[in-house]
Image (tube, rainbow, N blue to C red):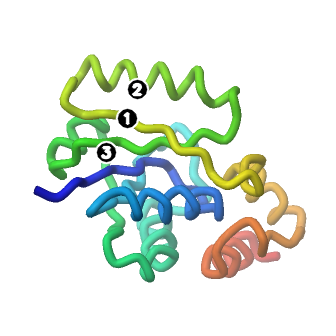
Amino acid sequence: MKRTAIYPGSFDPLTNGHLDVIQRAAKLFDRVVVAVAVNESKHPLFTLAERVALVNKAVAHLPNVETDSFNGLLVEYAEARKAGTIVRGLRAVSDFEFEFQLALMNRKLDENIETIFMMPKDTYTFLSSRIVKEIARLGGNVSSFVPPNVQVALKKKLKV
């Protein structure tokens, strides 16, 4: 049986920190599903279809990684995809408390699905999609923070 992991997020946009976690998860699991979440409360810059396409292009070189989207409870989505693990990224200690609460709630909802925490390379620990969008909005160079296709999409979307 294949070991499948789900790496969920809004990915608005995908950063090199996200990509680092995806690449390392791809070494640990037979299949990794990058699950782009529908979360209208965040008012994303990119549409769901755009985010899925951006992630899909950025992970195309990873044969055991696929991109999908989901709406609703993560554990129900993981179960439907026959995934036994949820991968969550931790950039800093400040992320841990929130992520720990989510992991415990997911365990309560479905005790068969485990959550593992992965830290990106130290060079990416400061990165967040919010910060990348702000730098791009102000005309800054984001080339070292996001994959090339995301940089192009940010310039086009923000008209900078």
| Residue sticking out furthest to the left | 1
Secondary structure state at the residue bearing disc 2? helix
Relative side of 76 to 123, left or right: left
Q: Which residue is mark 1?
A: 115
Q: Residues within 10 Å of mark 2 (few under 14, many from 20)?
A: many
Q: For residue 116, what is the image quadrant?
A: top left
Q: Which residue is mark 2?
A: 103
**Where does residue 23 sit, x and y in percent of width and height?**
49, 65
User: What residue do we see at 46% from left, 74% from top?
Assistant: 59
User: What residue do we see at 50% from left, 50% from top?
Assistant: 10
CB-based contact (under 8 Å), mark 3 and mark 2: no
**Where does residue 64 sit, x and y in percent of width and height?**
31, 71
Three-letter amino acid code of the residue under disc 3:
Asn
**Where does residue 11 sit, x and y in percent of width and height?**
54, 56
CB-based contact (under 8 Å), mark 1 and mark 2: yes
Which quadrant does the N terminus fall into?
bottom left
Secondary structure state at the residue bearing disc 3? loop
> Is residue 1 positioned above or below 150 on the image?
above
The first of marks 1 and 2 along the sequence is 2
Relative side of 129 to 106, left or right: right
Three-letter amino acid code of the residue under disc 2:
Ala
Q: Which residue is mark 3?
A: 71
User: What residue do we see at 15% from left, 49% from top?
Assistant: 82
User: What residue do we see at 33% from left, 60% from top?
Assistant: 32
